[in-house]
Amino acid sequence: MDREKERMREFFEEFFFGPAERVFGPFLNEEARQHLSQARLEVLKAMRSFIDAEINRLEEKKAKGCSS
């Protein structure tokens, strides 16, 4: 199971951040790398927020369907 999680993490990293790293990576100084690291964290938080909202929406939809 841990290997599967690691593969998914690697896929996510490559899909979302790989292109920018390949294009800009060779030119980045340490300050820019720190900003990109923070941006990565913010993207993950945004995705978590989106997923949480979708879960809530589906749970509410299911609850309304069951109570009718």
Image (cartoon, rainbow, N blue to C red):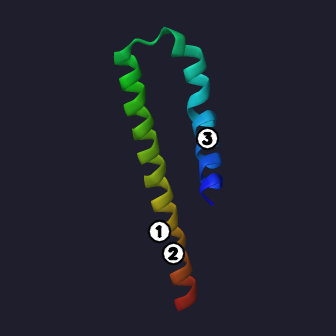
Residue type at mark 1 is Asn
Residue drawn at point x = 46 percent, y = 44 percent:
44
Q: Residue furthest left?
A: 31
The percent position of residue 48, horizontal first and vertical second, equals 46, 53
Q: Which residue is mark 2?
A: 59
Q: Quadrant of the N terminus?
A: bottom right
Specify the quadrant of the image occupied by residue 14: top right
Please say if 25 is above or below 8.
above
Q: Of callouts 3 and 1, which one flags the residue occurring earlier in the amino acid sequence?
A: 3
42 is higher (above) or lower (below) than 62: above
**Residue to which mark 3 is pinned:** 10
Question: What's under tag 3, amino acid-wise?
Answer: Glu
Report the front residue among 4 and 40. 4
Of all residues, the one furthest to the top in this rendering is 27
Secondary structure at badge 1 equals: helix
Residue 42, given in percent of the width and then of the height, sits at 40, 39
* Residue for badge 1: 56
Query: Mark 3 or 2, which is nearer the eye?
Result: 3
What residue is drawn where x is 45% and y is 35%? 40
Q: Nearer the viewer, residue 61 or 25?
A: 25
Marks 1 and 2 close (CB-CB < 8 Å): yes
